[in-house]
Each structure stands twice: as C-alpha cells, then as structure tokens.
Amino acid sequence: MTLRHALKRRQGWQRRLTVPQFTVVTGLLVIVIGTILLATPLCSSSRVGIWEALFTATSAITVTGLSIIDIGTDLTSFGQAVLALMILSGGLGLMAITTFLQGFVVQGTGLRRRLDRGQTLDEFGIGGVGRTFRGIALTAALVILLGALVLYSFGFDDIPDRGERLWAAVFHSISAYNNAGFGLWSDSLQRYHNNVVVNGVVMVLIVMGGLGWRVTSDLANRGFRYRGRGRRRLSLHTRLVLRTTALLVVFGAVGLALTEWLNRGEVFIGMDWPERWMTALFESVTARTAGFTTVPFSLENITDSGTLLLITLMFIGASPGGTGGGIKTTTVAALMAATRSTLRGRETVVIRNRQISDKVVLRALSITTASLIFVLAMALLLSIASNLNGEEPFTFLEMLFTCISAFATVGLDLGVTEQLGRFGQAVLMVGMFVGRLGILLLLSAIWEAMTQEQIHMHRQNRIGYPREDLYV
C-alpha cells in the first residue's frame, strides 16, 4: 500500500504544481527540446555543439538575441525555421502558452486556481485564456505578415534571390515583432543603416510588440469609439503605456544623439544630421529589449554617457504583456508617481486623477529592487569568474551592460558574450531565463516549493500586526 500510494503521488505531481512552478518547468522543458533540435545535423553545422545549442535556444525562448554562433551560416534553413518557431513561442508570451497548456494538464481546478491563473497571466480574465491567446496569435500573425510584405517589396530589394529575400523578410519580421533581435547576418542590420524602409518597419514592429496585448486590444476596441464630447476613452493603463513609451523613445533618441555629438563619440562619425537622427531613433527603440543595431557597438566607438543611457533604456524595457523584457514602463511610471506624491506631501499615489493602490506601488518597488540586486549579482559573478579564470579583462561598464542586456532580454552586445567562458555564459543564460519569466514569479515558485502547507501560508497572510514608524 505504501509503494502504491507513493507511485500515485508521483504520477500526479504535475497537478500539484502551482502556476509559477508550472511556468518554470514548462520554460525549461521547451529550452531542452529546442537545444536537442538545434544540436542535430539537420539544424546546424558541426560548429554548433550542445553548449552552443543550449545558449541559442535559451536566448530564443527568452527572446533575447544574444548569440555565440552565426545564425546565417551555422544554422541550416531548417534550423533557422526552428529558431523562428522558438522565438514565436517565447515572444507571444511564455506565460500565456503555459496557462493554455495547463488547462489540459490540471483538471478539476476550482475557482481560486482559475483566479490565480488569470492574475499570473497579466489578468487576462477568468475562462478567457483560450480566447485571449487566439486574439494574441491573430494580431501577431497579421502584423508580422504586413511587416514581412513591406520588407520583401521595398526593404530588402537588394537581395536578388526571391526565396532568400522572402525568408529574410519573414524571419526579421518575426524577430522584430517579438523583440528578439536575432538576424540572419552577423552585422545585424548595419548594412541597412541608411535604409528608411527597413529602419521604419523594424521600429514599428518593435514598438507594437512591446506595447502589450492589453494596449493593442484597447486601441482596437475603444480607440475609434467616441463617447460624450467626442473624446476617446482609453483605459488608464493604455494611456500611461503610450505616453511613457513615447517619452522614453524621444528621450533616448535626443539623449543619444546629443551625448555622442558633445563627447565626440565615433558611433555617428561620418553621418549627416538626418541620418544621425534616424540612427539615434532606431537605437533608442531597439535598446528597449529588441537588440537590433544599425551601427557597431563597442566601448571604443560609443562614449560612457551613451552607454549609460542605453543601460537605462534597457533596464526599463517594454510594457506589461508585451514581447519585451525589463522592469516595464508602468513600473517606472508608478515609482515616479509615488515620488511626486511624496514630494507633494500626499499620502496616496495619484496618476491622471486616479488613485493607485498601495499594492501596485509595493509591487513596482519590489520588482525594481529585486531586479537591481539580481543584475548586480550577475555582474559580480562575471567579475569574479573572469579574474579567477584569467580571461580577457572587461571593464565593469561592459559587464554591467551585458548583464542588463541579458536580464532585460535585449540582446545588445559590446563584444563580451562570445569572449566569456562557460561559467560567464551560464550566468547570462540564467539571467535571460529569470528576466523573461519575471523575477517575482521565479521567487514565488521557489518560495512555494519550500513551503509545504499552503493553507498555513494563507493563514499567515491574514494575521495583522501593530504599526510602527520607520525613519528613511
């Protein structure tokens, strides 16, 4: 009886997993499958071993774009197609796919479990996971196809072979919309640095993918519905995301152009001002988790102030529910609003005449603090590993840039990733995985695994404690 009971418990392990734990397990499973596929001769050349395949699969599933192989030459056409499928599965929302699959694995879940799943899935709604996922997939397919059509007809018209041009258009459209940053050429999009069509289409795809499903759905459902005195009534979330995104793009473009001009950086050398502004705008957009670049990046041709500006944009990232990473635009907006309320002596946080709950502000603070600690820990590990192994020394700015690029799933590289040893690349893989899933979700999965009695934990949450002031 004891053996039968133990076997029955082991067979039902997947039903006892919480949503965060199931998300982590599913993500790891998809990465393992992708690694095995990419390592086969059908997908790659002999240069790609298990380690290179593992790093590439992790970067694809987390839609990061960091790579230690040449996608265009080291992967076969079939391997590139497999990589595109992994980018799609990770970019369209690993958590959305996980919860959609969980409906088939976990049967008989009650209302509380369905509520928890809805909250984990960016509050997609009770019973609406399948419908929402279909909406996400259809919207993504439409935008990707339109982007590929424009790139094929007007952007990549310098490619004579039609089949090669079509695949380049489709692959880069998928990569751009999913904020992945993978390209078929070793120089990313540097050969198209003065091509207005390629720059414009890629930027539009990146922004649309980074806005998030809630924003695009709100724009489609309410954007053209006029009420009252003809004013559009979009949700506070949509208005906040659009405004913050626009401010960050403009701030990044103007800041990058001016800092490199004033400090005589070499990244824009030889460019006239129209081309310089287009390049600065593109890099400002792509720094927020996309990873494409139209100019070569290294500490030799970009100033420290420009590098710091890119680090800031990368760390903030895209918006909730989007295909990008980072701490998210709404997190920064909530923190700025809390700072403004503190300076004005208010006890509540108000954004556009709407009071924000303390729970939201506390979550924003937790995400930012945990992310900062995690990134600094990554940089510390890279520094220790490079010193112990006698690897080529990197500056702290290079290591911090690379760690934030991995954690925020950006993919911009100063030439550090390929020069790192196995341990350093493993640190980046962990950072990519944690950054894509979300630092709080991973910590929640670990905490729930350590806590055996969930009922006891819920009871603990209901306990009230006396208040006391703390001086800060």
Image (cartoon, rainbow, N blue to C red):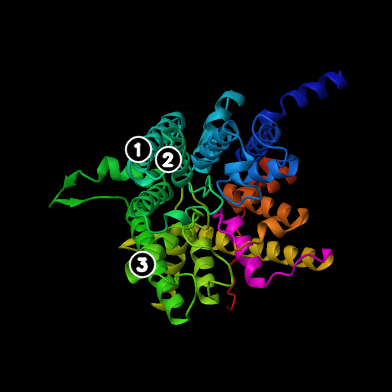
Q: Which amino acid type is marked by label 1? A: Leu
First in sequence, mark 3 or 2: give its number.
2
Where is residue 298 shown, x and y percent of the image? 58, 67
Tell me, yes or no, whether the two marked residues, 1 and 2, touch with CB atoms within 8 Å.
Answer: yes
Q: For the view shown, which residue lies furthest in the left direction?
A: 229
Query: Disc 3 marks which residue?
Result: 277
Number of other residues with Cα within 10 Å of mark 2, as a class: few under 14, some 14 to 19, many 20 or more: many
Above or below 137: residue 206: below
Nearest the viewer among 267 and 134 is 267
Q: Which amino acid type is marked by label 2? A: Ala
First in sequence, mark 1 or 2: give its number.
1
Tell me, yes or no, whether the two marked residues, 1 and 3, touch with CB atoms within 8 Å.
Answer: no
Q: Is residue 396 inside the magenta stretch?
A: yes
Query: Disc 1 marks which residue?
Result: 149
Above or below 309: residue 143: above
Number of other residues with Cα within 10 Å of mark 1, as a class: few under 14, some 14 to 19, many 20 or more: some
Q: Identify the residue shown where x is 58% and y is 45%.
A: 62
Where is residue 176 shown, x and y percent of the image? 45, 47
Q: Tell me which segment is drawn in magenta.
A: 389-413
Where is residue 271 shown, x and y percent of the image? 39, 69
User: Would residue 378 be found to the left or right of residue 467 on screen?
Assistant: right
Residue 275 is drawn in which quadrant? Answer: bottom left
Nearest the viewer among 116 and 280 is 280
Nearest the viewer among 414 and 140 is 414
Q: Identify the residue shown where x is 35% and y is 61%.
A: 246
First in sequence, mark 1 or 3: give its number.
1
User: SS for tag 3?
Assistant: helix
Q: Identify the residue shown where x is 67% and y is 72%.
A: 396
Q: Is residue 462 visible?
A: no
Tell me, yes or no, whether the two marked residues, 3 and 2, touch with CB atoms within 8 Å.
Answer: no
User: SS for tag 2?
Assistant: helix
Query: Disc 2 marks which residue?
Result: 169
